[in-house]
Image (tube, helix red, strand yellow):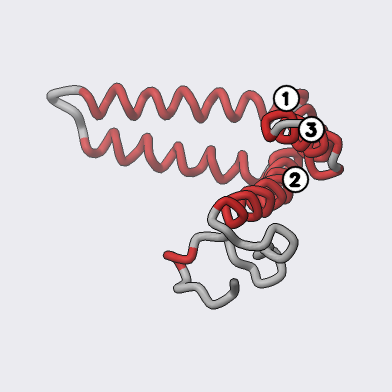
Amino acid sequence: MDIIELARDLGKKIQDDERFLAMHVASQQCDADEALQNMIGEFNLKRMAINNEAQKEDRSEDVLRKYNDELRAIYAEIMQNPNMAAYNAAKNELDALVQRVTTIITMSADGEDPDSCDCDSCGCGGNCSSCGGGCH
């Protein structure tokens, strides 16, 4: 089996993982939440209104400020929605898994021992420029 086939197998394993499945279910719940979808639509319309106002030669800073305040209020409401909160939590879990896999692959490609390179235990994201190293 070549490396690309192994990567495809890994992709299938990720899609079988409980974290992926939880995110998929949470995404479907968000899609089915009519109130949430309406808020997201309102958010997108408000964002377009901000862009339209900002591009005007005679734009009004007061109107932009009002739109931005409204946008922040809609965003806060979206983020308080239980389905959105569940989605964000599930997505964070899946992102952590993918980051861990990516870190192991990257460190292996840099010559580290594939059996021991794993920054999950030390909380490292794999990018030493952010912390100065020391965990691997």
Count the labels in the image: 3
Earlier residue among tags 2 and 1: 1
Secondary element at tag 1: helix
Q: Quadrant of residue 14?
A: top right
- The image shows residue 105, relative to residue 45, as above or below, that is below
Pointers 3 and 1 in contact (C-beta within 8 Å): no
Give me the disc on residue 9. Answer: 3
Query: CA–CA distance between discs 3 and 1?
Result: 29 Å
Q: Return the residue nearer the eye: 61 or 10.
A: 10
- Residue lying farthest to the left in this orientation: 57
Taking the image as shown, residue 71 lies to the left or right of residue 97, namely left
Q: Residue 83 in the image: x percent, y percent?
A: 75, 39
Which residue type carries mark 1?
A: Asp
Which quarter of the rendering shows the N terminus? top right
Q: Return the residue nearer the eye: 53 or 98.
A: 98
Give me the disc on residue 90. Answer: 2
Which residue type carries mark 2?
A: Ala
Q: Residue 51 in the image: x percent, y percent?
A: 32, 26
Q: Return the residue nearer the eye: 42 or 18.
A: 18
Secondary element at tag 3: helix
For mark 1, what is the residue? 31
Residue at image x 57%, y 51%? 109
Which residue type carries mark 3?
A: Asp
